[in-house]
Amino acid sequence: MKKTGLILSICALFFALFLQGCGKVKEEKNEPRLLLGVSQIGSESAWRIGNTKDIEEEALNYGVGLMLENANQKQENQIAAIRRFIAYKVDVIAFSPIVEEGWDNVLKEAKDAGIPVILVDRDINTSKEDLTTCLIGADFYNEGVMAAEYLKRKADSLQMDHVNIVEITGTENSTPMRQRQAGFFDTIKDDKRMTILESIDGDFLTSRGAECMRYLLDTYGSEIDAVYSHNDEMTIGALPEIEEAGFAPGKDMIIISIDAGQEAIDVLKEGKINCVVECTPKLGKALMETALKLKNGEEVDKVIHPEELCFSDEMDTSTIAPRGY
Ligand code: GYE
């Protein structure tokens, strides 16, 4: 009996040690590999909401501790968030600058604190060097090129001798607004058929897209041949206005959008949008990998652009896979 008791105690001891061991391993596993402060612009679009979700999911996958703040479309909120990340001594800061100008002071503070900064989605404009380490985001210029190339092909296929375009742009002075416009303008500038009637700021918002379209229809009416809108939300806001004014979007007017979220793809399938250039919000994986490299003092790529496609009425739209945002 005594012997059995001793064996049982030894087993219990081993079991206890084993459990303790498991606990240790678990604790270490739960310890975040790094603390990442992320300042997100807001929730203005399906793109933005998809981007936030993707960053949260990838942080979990990579065991990265995330401090994520939503700036509700205000630059001052982003600046305040970055200051909080510095005070909290996060390992790496990432942010999507709402506009390109006005970041020098706060980024100098991050640099002085020795915290590397990653630009996600949008770029900044500065004369100072080394305030940020790299940019992970779409090639917006190329998106504008793809949109204009589609319009040229469409004008060819419809044998149009002139194309009057109205442009509803994204947030003034933001990188996607500037670059999507530049890529588009550069690509149509030698095509004599193309005229920009007006460019108007729709701030990437559905409500502004509707307002802008109402104004453009009141001003130019049936002169409008094509609408180039810098994101899906503004496009979706514009469509009912076009219909109310008595025109069939996708037929009487060529409609071109950017982002390619599910809602816009569904409308493309209905024939009310002719072309949607893809802009993927799935930047989380590259962000986590880059942040981990920076923490380990490794070199990172200066610019990471994801691959992007163009969806249009030139293809069999039934084959487009679910978009996930
Ligand atoms: O196209 C728009 C969003 O910066 C790429 O911002 C992003 C843009 C996107 O609100 O829908």
Image: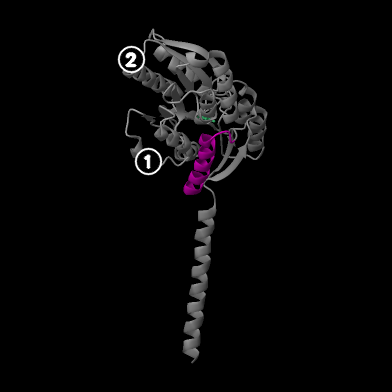
Q: Residue at x 36, y 29 (%)?
A: 313
Image-based side of 205 in relation to 157, left or right: right
Task: Relative to 309, say whether 67 is above or below.
Answer: below
Give the distance between the C-alpha atoms of the residues marked 1 and 2, in whole angstroms.
Answer: 31 Å
Q: Secondary structure at mark 2?
A: loop
Q: Badge 2 local density, few (<14 within 10 Å), some, or many (20+)?
A: few
Q: Closer to the observer: label 1 or label 2?
A: 2
Of marks 1 and 2, which one's residue comes earlier in the chain? 2
Residue hosting label 2: 159
Q: Does label 1 point to a residue whose CB lies under 8 Å from ligand 1?
A: no
- Judge by depth and name the residue closer to the eye, 315 or 220: 220
* Amino acid tagged 1: Ala
Residue 296 appears in the rendering: no
In the shown orientation, is residue 19 left or right of residue 191?
right
The residue identified by callout 1 is 321
In the image, the segment drawn in magenta is 43-63
Front residue of 207/252: it is: 252
- In which image quadrant can residue 173 be found? top right
| Above or below, comparing residue 145 to residue 305 in the picture | above
Q: Is residue 252 magenta?
A: no
Question: Residue 318: where, in percent of width, then height?
Answer: 35, 38
The answer to whether mark 2 is within 8 Å of ligand 1 is no
- Which quarter of the picture shows residue 91? top right
Position of residue 223 in the picture relative to residue 73 (left or right):
left
Amino acid carrying mark 2 in the image: Gln
Dots 1, 2 in contact, CB < 8 A: no
Give how far across and how far down residue 126 sits, in percent: 56, 19
Magenta-drawn stretch contains 62: yes
Q: How many marks?
A: 2
